[in-house]
Amino acid sequence: MQPRLPCFKLGIRMGDPLFVRRFGRSGRPGAYLRIVEEGDVGAGDAIEVHPQTEHDISLRFMSHAILTDHSLLPELRAIPGLIPEWHEWIDQRGG
Protein backbone atom coordinates (compact mmCIF):
# COMPACT_ATOMS: atom_id res chain seq x y z
CA MET A 1 0.00 0.00 0.00
CA GLN A 2 1.19 3.46 -0.78
CA PRO A 3 -0.64 6.70 -0.02
CA ARG A 4 -0.85 9.56 -2.46
CA LEU A 5 0.61 12.50 -0.58
CA PRO A 6 1.10 16.11 -1.59
CA CYS A 7 4.62 17.42 -2.15
CA PHE A 8 6.21 20.84 -2.33
CA LYS A 9 5.36 21.03 -6.05
CA LEU A 10 1.68 21.26 -5.18
CA GLY A 11 2.41 24.27 -2.98
CA ILE A 12 4.25 25.90 -5.88
CA ARG A 13 1.39 25.13 -8.27
CA MET A 14 -1.13 26.60 -5.84
CA GLY A 15 1.09 29.63 -5.20
CA ASP A 16 0.90 28.94 -1.46
CA PRO A 17 3.87 27.57 0.51
CA LEU A 18 1.54 26.48 3.35
CA PHE A 19 -0.87 24.60 1.08
CA VAL A 20 0.74 21.18 1.58
CA ARG A 21 0.49 21.48 5.37
CA ARG A 22 -3.19 22.51 5.20
CA PHE A 23 -3.86 19.72 2.72
CA GLY A 24 -2.37 17.19 5.14
CA ARG A 25 -4.43 18.49 8.04
CA SER A 26 -7.63 18.19 6.01
CA GLY A 27 -7.53 14.41 6.51
CA ARG A 28 -8.59 13.58 2.94
CA PRO A 29 -5.74 11.58 1.39
CA GLY A 30 -5.89 9.88 -1.95
CA ALA A 31 -4.68 6.51 -3.14
CA TYR A 32 -2.91 5.10 -6.15
CA LEU A 33 -5.07 2.50 -7.85
CA ARG A 34 -4.03 -0.38 -10.08
CA ILE A 35 -5.69 -0.68 -13.48
CA VAL A 36 -6.84 -4.26 -14.00
CA GLU A 37 -8.29 -3.93 -17.48
CA GLU A 38 -7.29 -1.37 -20.08
CA GLY A 39 -10.07 0.61 -21.71
CA ASP A 40 -11.87 3.92 -21.96
CA VAL A 41 -13.50 5.54 -18.95
CA GLY A 42 -15.99 8.36 -19.24
CA ALA A 43 -18.08 10.55 -16.98
CA GLY A 44 -20.72 8.48 -15.23
CA ASP A 45 -19.00 5.12 -15.82
CA ALA A 46 -18.88 2.78 -12.84
CA ILE A 47 -15.50 2.05 -11.26
CA GLU A 48 -15.11 -0.84 -8.82
CA VAL A 49 -12.52 -0.68 -6.06
CA HIS A 50 -11.61 -3.97 -4.39
CA PRO A 51 -9.61 -3.44 -1.19
CA GLN A 52 -6.88 -6.03 -0.76
CA THR A 53 -5.32 -5.11 2.55
CA GLU A 54 -3.95 -7.56 5.08
CA HIS A 55 -4.24 -5.03 7.92
CA ASP A 56 -6.64 -2.49 9.36
CA ILE A 57 -4.55 0.65 8.92
CA SER A 58 -6.41 3.11 6.72
CA LEU A 59 -4.90 5.54 4.24
CA ARG A 60 -6.31 8.33 6.40
CA PHE A 61 -4.37 7.03 9.43
CA MET A 62 -1.23 6.55 7.35
CA SER A 63 -1.48 10.05 5.92
CA HIS A 64 -2.06 11.54 9.39
CA ALA A 65 1.00 9.72 10.76
CA ILE A 66 3.20 10.87 7.87
CA LEU A 67 2.01 14.45 7.55
CA THR A 68 0.83 15.43 11.01
CA ASP A 69 1.68 13.13 13.93
CA HIS A 70 5.04 11.34 13.66
CA SER A 71 4.48 9.64 17.03
CA LEU A 72 2.21 7.23 15.08
CA LEU A 73 4.95 6.16 12.65
CA PRO A 74 5.90 2.95 14.51
CA GLU A 75 2.41 1.59 13.77
CA LEU A 76 3.10 1.89 10.04
CA ARG A 77 6.04 -0.54 10.24
CA ALA A 78 3.61 -3.45 10.68
CA ILE A 79 1.92 -2.89 7.31
CA PRO A 80 2.53 -5.91 5.06
CA GLY A 81 3.86 -4.84 1.68
CA LEU A 82 4.98 -1.39 2.78
CA ILE A 83 7.57 -0.38 0.21
CA PRO A 84 11.21 -0.14 1.38
CA GLU A 85 11.30 3.61 0.74
CA TRP A 86 8.65 4.14 3.42
CA HIS A 87 10.61 2.02 5.91
CA GLU A 88 13.67 4.20 5.23
CA TRP A 89 11.62 7.37 5.63
CA ILE A 90 10.18 6.14 8.95
CA ASP A 91 13.68 5.18 10.16
CA GLN A 92 15.00 8.67 9.36
CA ARG A 93 12.31 10.16 11.59
CA GLY A 94 12.97 7.81 14.49
CA GLY A 95 9.80 5.75 13.99
Image (cartoon, rainbow, N blue to C red):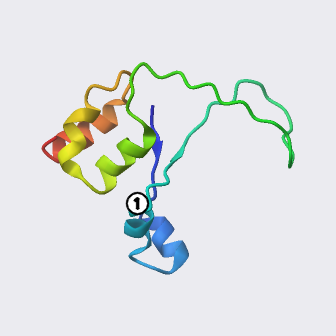
- Which image quadrant for residue 92? top left
On the rendered image, what quadrant is the N terminus found in? top left
Query: Is 16 placed left or right of 61 in the picture?
Result: right
Residue type at numbered disc 1: Gly
- Residue shown at the point (56%, 40%) measured from the top left: 32
Query: Is 91 placed left or right of 62 in the picture?
Result: left
- Residue shown at the point (29%, 47%) measured from the top left: 65
- Residue shown at the point (16%, 40%) measured from the top left: 95
Q: Percent x, y for residue 63?
A: 38, 48
Residue indicated by mark 1: 24
Check the image and report above or below for 49 versus 20.
Answer: above
Query: Is 75 placed left or right of 49 in the picture?
Result: left
- Which image quadrant for residue 47? top right
Question: As drawn, which residue projects farthest toward the bottom?
Answer: 15
> Is disc 1 placed on a helix, strand or loop?
helix
Nearest the eye: 71 or 80 = 71
Q: Percent x, y for residue 40?
A: 86, 38
Nearest the eye: 81 or 23 = 23
- Which image quadrant for residue 21? bottom left
Question: As drawn, which residue projects farthest toward the left?
Answer: 94
Nearest the eye: 35 or 25 = 25
Q: Percent x, y for residue 52?
A: 53, 21
Q: Percent x, y for residue 38?
A: 79, 29
Count of number-bearing discs = 1
Check the image and report above or below for 22 versus 40.
Answer: below
